[in-house]
Amino acid sequence: MLKDVNLIQNIVSYQVVGLMKGMPKGNKDNRGLISGLLTVSQVAEILNVHPNTVRHWSDIGIIKACRFGYRRDRRFRPEEIEKLISDNHSST
């Protein structure tokens, strides 16, 4: 069981790093703030769910999101996604 959790954490870490490399840099004002965060689409791809599911989970507090800009776009810390996966895996 511990091997499974470690394997999933390694896969998620690898996917998160790969996705972060392709992230747009943004403007100079918030580049440092959001450069290490994941978008709704990126989280949905990692978790293999629809982006609306990620938004719903954020709304009900399953995943903590940071909100940015006048549109209040959501961004997620990679650690939150890893925690969600490990918590979900350990409860099964």
Image (spheres, rainbow, N blue to C red):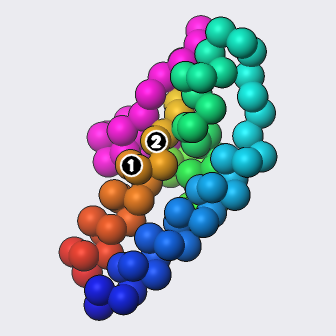
Q: Who's the residue at 63% across and 55% down the image?
A: 17
Residue that badge 2 annotates: 77
Residue that badge 1 annotates: 80
**Stretch of the chain drawn in magenta:** 55-72
What is the x, y in percent for residue 53? 50, 51
Q: Using the image as rendered, state which of residue 7 and residue 61 is in the foreground.
A: 7
Q: Using the image as rendered, state which of residue 48 and residue 4 is in the foreground.
A: 4
Distance in Å between CA atoms under marks 1 and 2: 5 Å
Residues at circles 1 and 2 in contact by the CB criterion of under 8 Å: yes
Q: Who's the residue at 53% across and 66% down the image?
A: 12
Is residue 50 visible in the rendered image? The answer is: no
Residue 89, picture quadrant: bottom left
Identified by mark 1, the residue type is Glu
User: Is 71 inside the magenta-drawn segment?
Assistant: yes
Give above or below for 42 relative to 87. above
Mark 1 crowd level (few <14, some 14–19, many ≥20, 10 Å Cα): some
